[in-house]
């Protein structure tokens, strides 16, 4: 991760899906894509939220690690909740997130594993910023705070 710490990250939006929230029935949305460090894919990301509802805190998940056909199975899942009213992110245990069940995920990290690893915490914060700024679809999530 050290080389990634010193370079600019760029986002490549990829796909999206919709559905309905299990608890309230409101429309939900999930977007995903990749974050590149130079030419190397450094992470896949997933942003999931209930549309027009600041009461359901959106999730932002990252599978951080190596990508490609011959890449080692080293991808770790880091998960965050976004609080729209405070405009802040909080690391959460990733084991309950859908990506934790994916064969692409080698390990889902706990909140403690994320917040006590200062290098990972710094890198994950950079990933959040990259997605927040680099994927225009995420602007809808940022707008939720204006509905509180």
Image: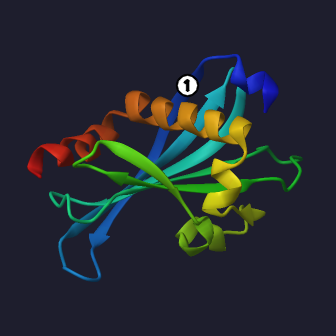
Q: Residue at x 54, y 71 (%)?
A: 98
Q: Which residue is drawn at 55% across and 25% down?
A: 10
Seen from the viewer's position, the closer of residues 136 and 110 is 110
Q: Locate residue 82 relative to residue 94 in the image: left or right.
A: left
Seen from the viewer's position, the closer of residues 2 and 37 is 2
Q: Name the residue under label 1.
A: 10
Secondary structure under the numbered disc 1 in the rendered image = strand
Q: Which residue is drawn at 27% across and 45% down?
A: 86
Q: In which quarter of the image is the N terminus?
A: top right
Measured along the vertical axis of the image, is residue 30 above or below residue 87? below
Measured along the vertical axis of the image, is residue 88 above or below residue 130? below
> What percent of the width, then of the height, locates residue 8?
61, 17
Q: Locate residue 22 relative to residue 53 in the image: left or right.
A: right
Q: Locate residue 65 relative to residue 15 in the image: left or right.
A: right
Q: Quadrant of residue 100?
A: bottom right
> What percent of the width, then of the height, locates residue 48?
38, 59
Measured along the vertical axis of the image, is residue 16 above or below residue 138? below
């Amino acid at each position: 991760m050290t080389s990634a710490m010193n370079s600019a990250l760029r986002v490549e939006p990829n796909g999206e899906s919709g559905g309905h929230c299990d608890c309230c029935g409101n429309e939900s949305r999930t977007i995903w894509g990749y974050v590149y460090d130079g030419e190397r894919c450094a992470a896949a990301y997933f942003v999931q939220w209930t549309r027009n509802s600041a009461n359901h805190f959106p999730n932002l998940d990252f599978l951080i690690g190596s990508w490609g056909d011959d890449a080692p199975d080293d991808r770790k899942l880091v998960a965050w909740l976004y609080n729209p009213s405070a405009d802040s992110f909080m690391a959460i245990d990733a084991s309950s997130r859908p990506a934790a069940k994916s064969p692409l995920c080698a390990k889902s990290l706990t909140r403690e594993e994320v917040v006590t690893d200062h290098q990972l915490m710094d890198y994950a914060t950079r990933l959040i910023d990259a997605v927040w700024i680099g994927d225009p679809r995420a602007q809808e999530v940022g707008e939720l705070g204006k509905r509180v």
